[in-house]
């Protein structure tokens, strides 16, 4: 049977789903069980590693490598992330170990990782393209071009940039390219936004403890410790040396905008419960045509740690939720 062009439906370009690194300190067995669930889910890629605090050391580099092998055997693309704020020789040793291993790609958390990865790529250009993490300050095409020449193959957009700004920096019709080829764009699409890092541990200070004698109190807060304003409004979230947003970024209805900006995929940051449904929901809406509004209703029923926000993506204050456009299935 002949079908006219008007009767055909062209499926939208698939957006890959990346499970970002766990931002919180979950017990070892909980982490192992979590990644077992991820292995059975629809995510395409997984970023492993401790990115916040080196005192969270129940899982060593060799353990992350073993987890990576299990996930790779399940068909996932595996990336090892480096710590965002490196302050001591022990942390530098761990960073070097991650950057110099040859099994998996590496996500650079800071400039110290970039230097090691650029040298490695120079010697093994076909095997060592790396990922630019969201805290590498790239706010222009020129900056992205500079990092592409070092061997970057993927760029995670800084969290405060709008989707349209990401498209202007790395447009789909003229993507930035380097020795590793065109740079792919990934957008942080779900989870509390990691806003800043400090040498001081905010959670320890909350409990009137020093960082070195913190009693590992952050383990008591599997989604971080909420911080309210003097008026009682949700404001920020304490997570060890990291400060996060109070709201939960959710770009579930932004499939059309993401594709128009040339995004290759989205990043979903783990939360303590319901995350398997989050990943499945993003896959259903972004890649299989499910209704975004209905899925958002399902998400709000999960009891997430904060209100949904999307302000930064729409070039507005990050704590806002903007729903002034129809949220079509993308």
Image (cartoon, rainbow, N blue to C red):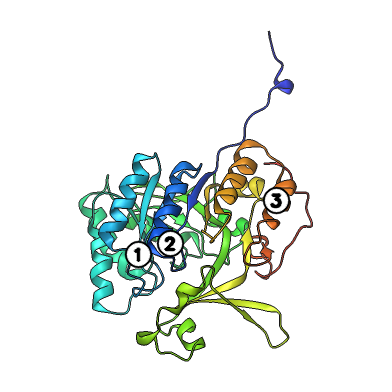
Q: Earlier in the sequence, mark 3 or mark 2?
A: 2
Query: Do tag 2 and tag 1 residues touch (Cβ < 8 Å)?
Result: yes
Residue 139 percent across, percent down from the top left? 51, 65
Q: Is residue 307 left or right of residue 58?
A: right
Cα separation between marks 3 and 1: 34 Å
Q: Position of residue 255 (x, y in %)?
A: 64, 46
Asked which secondary structure carries label 2, the reply is loop
Q: Is residue 192 above or below residue 16?
A: below
The quadrant of the picture occupied by the C terminus is top right
Q: From the image, state whether disc 3 or disc 1 is nearer to you.
A: 3
State whether residue 179 appears in this view: no
Looking at the image, which residue is at 43% across and 61% down?
133
Q: Residue 97 at x, y = what percent?
A: 23, 62
In contact (CB < 8 Å): disc 3 and disc 2:
no
Q: Which residue is mark 1?
A: 82
Q: CA distance from mark 3 to mark 2?
A: 30 Å
| Label at residue 99 | none
* Residue that extends furthest to the left in the rendered view of this protein: 123
- State which tag comes first along the sequence, 3 or 1: 1
How many callouts does the rendering have?
Answer: 3
Q: Is residue 49 left or right of residue 20?
A: left
Residue count near mark 1 (Cα–Cα under 10 Å), binned few <14, some 14–19, many ≥20: many
Q: Nearer the viewer, mark 3 or mark 2?
A: 3
Name the residue beneath numbered marker 3: 298
Residue located 40% across and 43% down the image: 76
Taking the spot 39% from the left edge, 70% from the top edge, the residue there is 84
Q: Which badge, 2 or 1, is on the more N-terminal residue?
A: 1
* Residue 63 appears in view: yes
């Amino acid at each position: 049977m002949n079908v006219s062009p008007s009767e055909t439906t062209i499926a939208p370009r698939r957006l890959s789903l990346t499970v970002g690194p766990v931002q919180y300190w979950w017990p070892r067995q909980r982490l192992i069980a979590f990644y077992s669930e991820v292995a059975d889910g629809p995510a395409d890629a997984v970023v492993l590693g401790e990115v916040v605090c080196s005192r969270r050391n129940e899982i060593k580099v060799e353990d992350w490598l073993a987890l990576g092998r299990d996930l790779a055997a399940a068909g996932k693309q595996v990336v090892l992330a480096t710590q965002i704020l490196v302050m001591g020789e022990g942390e530098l040793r761990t960073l070097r170990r991650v950057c110099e291993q040859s099994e998996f790609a590496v996500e650079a958390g800071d400039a110290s990782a970039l230097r090691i990865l650029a040298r490695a790529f120079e010697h093994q250009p076909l095997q060592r393209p790396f990922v630019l993490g969201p805290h590498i300050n790239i706010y222009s095409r020129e900056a992205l071009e500079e990092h592409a020449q070092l061997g970057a193959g993927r760029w995670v957009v800084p969290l405060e940039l709008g989707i349209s700004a990401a498209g202007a920096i790395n447009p789909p019709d003229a993507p930035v390219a380097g020795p590793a080829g065109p740079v792919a764009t990934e957008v942080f699409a779900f989870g509390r936004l990691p806003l800043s890092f400090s040498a001081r541990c905010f959670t320890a200070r909350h409990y009137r403890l020093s960082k070195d004698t913190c009693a590992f109190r952050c383990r008591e807060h599997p989604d971080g410790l909420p911080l309210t304003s003097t008026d009682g409004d949700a404001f920020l979230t304490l997570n060890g040396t990291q400060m996060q947003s109070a709201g939960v970024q959710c770009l579930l209805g932004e499939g059309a905008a993401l594709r128009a900006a040339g995004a290759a995929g989205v990043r979903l940051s783990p939360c303590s419960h319901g995350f398997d449904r989050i990943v499945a929901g993003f896959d259903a809406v972004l890649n299989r045509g499910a209704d975004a509004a209905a899925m958002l209703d399902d998400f709000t029923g999960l009891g997430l740690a904060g209100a949904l926000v999307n302000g930064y993506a729409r070039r507005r204050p990050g704590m806002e939720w903007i729903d002034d456009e129809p949220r079509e299935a993308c």
